[in-house]
Amino acid sequence: MEVSVQEFKKALEIVKPGLATTVTEIEQVTSFAFTKKNVITYNDEICITHPLGDLDMQGAIEAELLYKFISKVKSKQITLEINDTEVTMKAGRVKAVFNVDSEIKLPLDDEKLVSKGKWKDLPENFIEAISMAKGCVSKDMIQAKLNCVHLNKKGKVESSDGFRIFRYEFDDKLPLQTVLIPASSINSVIRIKPNQVAKGDEWVHFKNEHGTVISCRVVNDEFPNVDEYLEEGKKGVKLSFPKELIDSLDTAEIFSEDDLVKITIKGKKLIVSSGGHIATFKEKLKLDEEVDSFAFQITPYLLKDILKQIQFCTIYKDRLIFKNENFKYMTELTIVED
């Protein structure tokens, strides 16, 4: 059987994020599982399935060597010879033989994983919403619910680390049950650019236009009610941010060791700073308005995404809020002595 090297490699790249980085009690979590028409990876947090067209192969192959080999093949086509224990791959003068475990031991037939409702269309800006929300989750593992992106069936995408809150609101309800998805899984969801979702039992499933499916295990907890923290006060002060801030954030992001940058406002100056033990970065920008001094920390890509849509915030006594027709972002402020 002949297959396209480019298509085969692309398929492996798509499902690679579903591989476990270390061996666990679950067998084959570091393997590509081939089930006739699909290639699948599973690591107990996510499961990724991608169609392989006419590739008729059954079994599990250790992922690392297979991917490295396919990445080095220069031919456009590769010939596969398959039996119950081995697959031989030939491309020109090159031949590689891989052991195949014909019995797939991953829990792919687990009822909780495979149970899916009907596929329903996701709203147009869903990827934007979860991408922005991911930038506001906590890295402290003590409260699992704050390590997640909250998808609320009422049409909200939310996240918080206890100091910052992000909420994206859609006009209509989301076509799924209310779930908490770990931020560590959200990157893989974003990567496949899904346009559909299906409800599951302890898992939620996303699918893109190419037939790739990613299933994410959800966290069994409730996201806190953050409504009161997003309420806008009556005595807010508006502050516009300079256009140069986006370029400054690009550089500050390079130096950031904790995925955060610090924004300090002093008089008519805005100071961007980041870094740690190895190196530090600081840049001063001019402001048009003068406000009381304060500081806050934020994920740089999130602030860039916000500023591309809205260039000003409203400052209250102990917090600031960015708001447009789609989202709200709130962060607590630190008072800075002049």
Image (cartoon, helix red, strand yellow):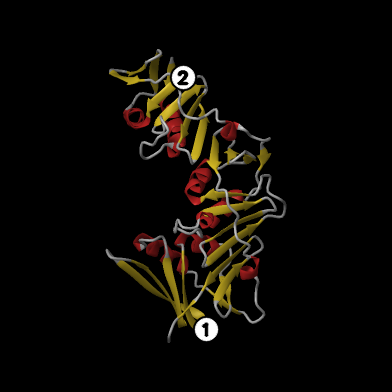
Return the mark for residue 291. Answer: 1
**Image coordinates for residue 171, horizontal then vertical, percent:** 71, 55
Can you identify the residue that label 2 sits on?
58
69 with respect to 324 (left or right): left
The residue at the far right in this view is: 172
| Residue sitting at x 48%, y 79% | 294
**Percent position (x, y) of residue 44?**
47, 38
* Closer mark to the observer between disc 2 and disc 1: 2
Q: Residue at x 54, y 55 (%)?
A: 145
Q: Are there few (<14), some (14-19), or many (20+) residues within 10 Å of tag 1?
A: some
Whether residue 155 sits left or right of residue 279 in the image: it is right
Mark 2 or 1 closer to N-term? Answer: 2
Q: Quadrant of the N terminus?
A: top left
Residue 86: image quadrant is top left
Q: Residue at x 52, y 80 (%)?
A: 288
* Disc number for residue 191: none
Residue under the image location 59 percent in, 31 percent down: 111
Estimate the spatial distance between the alpha carbons at disc 2 and disc 1, rounded to whole Å: 66 Å
- Kind of residue at disc 2: Gln
Number of dots carrying numbers: 2
**In this view of the protein, which residue sits in the foreground, 119 or 5?**
119
> Which amino acid, by three-letter code, is at mark 1?
Val
Could you say where residue 104 lies in the image, as x and y percent from the top left?
45, 23
**Secondary-structure class at tag 2:** strand
